[in-house]
Amino acid sequence: MTALAFLASALAFLLFGLATDQHHGKRFRRPCPKRRALALRATAWACLALAFALSLQAWGPVFGAIGWVATVMSGAALVFGGLNFIPLSAPAFRKG
């Protein structure tokens, strides 16, 4: 359950990142359409809710909330590093 909570948190922040024009443009070489950005953000929030439920199931009501915060922080750190520091082989999309 702990690993699933971590994966759901990391997926949530990956989706939040890809909902922005900067990161979407880097990976897909085009800006993120508004409807897709909305869908990505809604799915990301659902992943965070799933991670919370998994954390509560794994650690109980008291430590589950603390464990959820830990999985959210570590998932965010992993995705931040991946989106910002892993180099791309092709040139990125530039807005403007």
Image: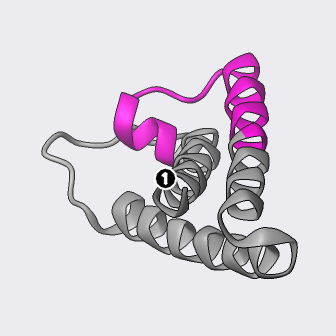
Q: Amino acid at mark 1?
A: Leu
**Residue 76 within the segment the image draws in magenta:** no
Residue at (73, 24) in percent of width and height: 39
Count of numbered labels shown in the rendering:
1
Q: Is residue 81 above or below residue 86?
A: below
Q: Quadrant of the C terminus?
A: top right
Residue at (75, 17) in percent of width and height: 35
Task: List x then y, in percent, for residue 7.
Answer: 49, 52
Q: Is residue 33 above or below residue 80?
A: above
Q: Nearer the viewer, residue 53 or 89?
A: 53
Q: Is residue 30 above or below residue 77?
A: above
Tell which residue pokes out farthest to the right in this image: 61
Q: Which residues are magenta?
A: 23-46
Label 1 belongs to which residue?
A: 7
Q: Residues within 10 Å of mark 1 (few under 14, many from 20)?
A: some
**Residue 26 within the segment the image draws in magenta:** yes
Q: Is residue 58 left or right of residue 45?
A: left
Q: Quadrant of the N terminus?
A: bottom right
The dominant secondary structure in magenta is: helix
Q: Is residue 96 above or below residue 58?
A: above
Q: Is residue 90 left or right of residue 3?
A: left
- Write down the quadrant of residue 70 in the picture: bottom right
Q: Is residue 62 left or right of residue 74?
A: right
Residue at (25, 61) in percent of width and height: 86
Task: List x then y, in percent, for residue 63.
Answer: 77, 81
Residue at (59, 70) in percent of width and height: 71
